[in-house]
Image: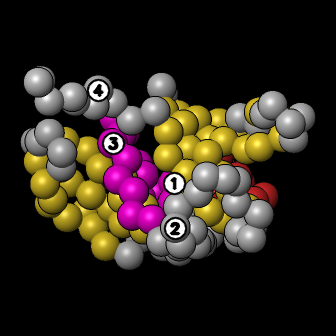
């Protein structure tokens, strides 16, 4: 029997303490689009989109089933690739009063070497913004 394989990631979920603070950070600071959507029961949920990717947002204490065993704000570590130079990101983050915790620093990405900046979202999730190493 042939081993089944996965092709790509469809979405991931972040549990958030403050929905509006999260939406504001990811749209204003990281340039994602807020995409509210309705589900079968008629309720509205929230997602963030960038390129072909989506992050669904679950409110802390009101997570949707099924869910992670221990959903909690601030437990994620996410790395995003960008085509924008990191010095442009540094200026942009400073303009939004977002502290860079580390970087630029060389790292190993999933497909190639990268150079990264590290920062935190409103829940304390670690956010890594990376460019291919030259």
Q: Secondary structure at mark 2?
A: loop
Tag 1 residue: 92
Marks 1 & 4, CB-CB < 8 Å contact: no
Left or right: where 37 falls relative to 57: right
Part of the protein shown in magenta: 76-94
Mark 1 surroundings: few (<14), some (14-19) or many (≥20) residues within 10 A: some
Q: Is residue 67 above or below residue 8?
A: below
* Rendering coords of residue 34 (x, y %): 70, 39
State the mark number for residue 69: 2
* In contact (CB < 8 Å): disc 2 and disc 4: no
Which structural element holds mark 4?
loop
Residue 89 place in picture, x, y as percent: 42, 52
Indicate whether residue 83 is drawn in magenta.
yes
In this rendering, which labeled residue sits more in front, label 2 or label 1? 2
Task: Report the Cα–Cα distance between label 3 and label 1.
Answer: 16 Å
The quadrant in which residue 67 appears is bottom right
Which color scheme does this rendered protein use?
secondary structure
Q: CA distance from mark 2 to mark 4?
A: 25 Å
Q: Earlier in the sequence, mark 2 or mark 3?
A: 2
Q: Quadrant of the C terminus?
A: top left
Local crowd size for mark 2, using a 10 Å CA cut-off: few (<14), some (14–19), many (≥20): few
Visible residue check, residue 15: yes
């Amino acid at each position: 029997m042939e081993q089944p394989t996965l092709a790509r990631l469809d979405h991931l979920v972040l549990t958030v303490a403050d929905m509006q603070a999260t939406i504001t950070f990811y749209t204003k600071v990281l340039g994602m689009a807020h995409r509210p959507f309705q589900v079968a029961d008629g309720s509205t949920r929230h997602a963030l989109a960038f390129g072909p990717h989506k992050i669904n947002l679950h409110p802390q204490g009101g997570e949707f089933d099924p869910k992670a065993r221990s959903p909690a704000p601030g437990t994620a570590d996410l790395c995003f690739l960008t085509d924008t130079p990191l010095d442009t990101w540094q200026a942009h983050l400073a303009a939004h009063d977002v502290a860079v915790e580390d970087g630029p620093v060389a790292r190993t990405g999933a497909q190639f070497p990268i150079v990264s900046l590290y920062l935190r979202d409103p829940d304390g999730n670690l956010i890594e913004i990376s460019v291919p190493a030259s």
